Image (tube, helix red, strand yellow):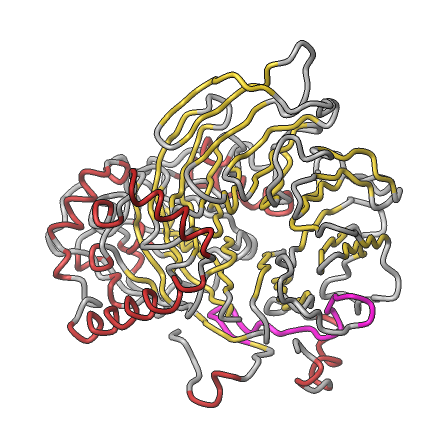
Amino acid sequence: MATEGGGKEMNEIKTQFTTREGPYKLLPHSEYSRPNRVPFNSQGSNPVRVSFVNLNDQSGNGDRLCFNVGRELYFYIYKGVRKAADLSKPIDKRIYKGTQPTCHDFNHLTATAESVSLLVGFSAGQVQLIDPIKKETSKLFNEERLIDKSRVTCVKWVPGSESLFLVAHASGSMYLYNVEHTCGTTAPHYQLLKQGESFAVHTCKSKSTRNPLLKWTVGEGALNEFAFSPDGKFLACVSQDGFLRVFNFDSVELRGTMKSYFGGLLCVCWSPDGKYVVTGGEDDLVTVWSFGDCRVIARGHGHKSWVSVVAFDPYTTSVEESDPMEFSGSDEDFQDLLHFGRDRANSTQSRLSKRNSAESRPVSVTYRFGSVGQDTQLCLWDLTEDILFPHQPLSRARTHTNVMNATSPPAGSTGNSVTTPGNSAPPPLPRSNSLPHSTVSNAGSKSSVADGAIASGVSKFATLSLHDRKDRHHEKDHKRNHSMGHISSKSSDKLNLVTKTKTDPAKTLGTPLCPRMEDVPLLEPLICKKIAHERLTVLIFLEDCIVTACQEGFICTWGRPGKVGLLSSQNQASSPGGTVV
C-alpha cells in the first residue's frame, strides 16, 4: 500500500490506518499525559521518552509506564487496550529543579510487584537510580559531574545483568557503571584498554574499584543512541558524525560500520533475530544494514524531516513456507532472546525455530519495522525476501505492494541464490506473534557475491527511472537546503571537524560504507500518516498495541487489529477532536 492522502488530508491528524493485517485504531481513552492533559510547551525541552516494564503480578495487569515531560517524571499503571487511563493516580511523580530527565530504562530482570529499578538520565549529566514503587531514590551517579558534564542521551541496563548499566552522553563518550560501586570524590583517571578506528576504550585507574568501570569514546560529536543486540553480545551505536558502529560488547571489538547519506544518525534498533540493524537520522531516511554482510541492503524514504525513532515489530511477521530446499538456519540464531521484554513472543519463536530445523523447509520472512519523525508522521515498513536476497533469479521475485519497484532484483544474478518458489503470491495474513527466522543461505552471507550481483544489475532496478531520479535530486536539494540547516552551530563545527579528518563525504559516498542512492533498493512505506501536531519522539510495539508519543507530552495507544476490545464502542462515539492534539 502506497502512502495515502494528499492535499487537505495531509494536515489532518489520523486516528486510524489500515495495513494488510487490518485496521489499527487510536484509543483516546488510553491516552496518557500529565494529569491536567494540557499540551506541554516543548520549546527548548528534551524529548519525551517512554519506558515499559511488566511486573508479572497476579492481577494480570502488570504493565507499568514511565515517561518524562519537561522537568517532570511520571510512573503509571498502563492499562493498554483493556481499560481507560486514570491520570489522577500516578504511582509516582517527580519534579526536578535545575535539570531535566532525558531518558530512562527499567531493569526487567529484577522487577517485581513490590520493587522496580529505574535508571533516569539527566540533561546535566547525572544518572539517578530510583524505585518508583517504593518511592525511593537509592543512588545518584556522576553527582558532581566529575565523570561527564554533558547531557545523557541514552541509558540502558546491560542485558542479563542486575547491576551493570551503560550511559551515553552528548560528549560522544559512553560509561559502564555498576550500581554497587561509588563514583569517587575526584575526577577519574583512565588507562587505555583498547583503541581502534574512531574509538577508544579506557579503564578507570584507582586503588579500589569505582565507577565508571569503562569509558568508551566513540566517533566525533554526540553519541545519540545505542542498542544491544537481542542476545546481548553486540552493541550498535549511532553518532552525530553520521556513523553506525557495531561492537562486540565483551571483547570491545569493532565489528562493522556504516555511514549515513549525510548528517547525524539519531536512532538505531536491531531486528528480533539480530540479523539486521535499522538506523534513522538527519538525512530523513531509514537505512537497513545487514549485520552478517556488513553492508547497506536498503533505504526507506517516506519522512519529510529527521527520523527520531526506529523500532522493529516482533509481533507482525509474515512466515510462508516454500518448496523443500537446502536450509542453513539453526536454533542458534534465536538463543538468548529473553531480554528487552520479548518474553511473550518466545514460545512462538522457539516453535518456529524447531519446525524449521526439523523439517528442513525454508521460510519466507517479512520483517515489519516502524519509524516516527520530526515531521509528525508514523511510517510502517515491510522488509521482504526480494530486498534481503536481491540476487535471486528475476522470474522468482515479486514486488510486494509496499515496496517500490526497486525491489525487482538485478538481472545479472548469480546461481548461488535463495529461491522462494512459494513467494509469487502476495504474503498471507501474518501468523500472530511470529518472530522472524530468516533463510540465510551460505551464499547469502558472502557480501562479495551479493555486491557483485547488485553492481551488475544496478541499471535494471525498475524504480530507478528518469522520473524517480529527478525526484531524488529534489530530495537531495531539500535535504541540503533544509535539514542540514537545523543542525546547531556546535554540531556543525563537530561535523566539519570530522570532515577534515577521516570522513569526507565525497570519499565515503559510493563505497560500501555509504552506497549511492541508486545502488540500493529504495523502500516505500506501507503506511505514512500524520498522527500528531508536534514532533514524534516515541515508537514502541507491544503485543496488542502500538505506543507513540509526541513532544507535547501525549502518549497514545493504537489498538492492533482485533485487539481493541471493550474500548472500541467508546472510541467510535468519541470525536476526533478528543485525540492527539
Please state which of residues 561 and 425 is positioned toward the viewer in this rendering.
561
Q: Dividing the image into 4 quarters, which one contains the C terminus?
A: bottom right
At x 47% / y 64%, what residue is drawn?
380
At x 51% / y 21%, what residue is drawn?
202
Query: Residue 71 appears in which quarter of the rendering?
Result: bottom right
Please state which of residues 470 and 386 is positioned toward the viewer in this rendering.
470
465 relative to 215 in the view: left or right: left
Query: Residue 151 appears in which quarter of the rendering?
Result: top right
The boundaries of the magenta stretch are: 17-36
How many numbered markers are drawn? 0
192 relative to 35 in the view: left or right: left
Residue 469 on image: x %, y %: 20, 70
Please state which of residues 352 and 473 is positioned toward the viewer in this rendering.
473
At x 49% / y 44%, what residue is drawn?
222
User: Is 35 one of the magenta-colored residues?
Assistant: yes
267 relative to 156 in the view: left or right: left
Residue 402 on image: x %, y %: 37, 68
Please state which of residues 359 and 485 is positioned toward the viewer in this rendering.
485
Does residue 293 lie above or below 411 as drawn? Answer: above
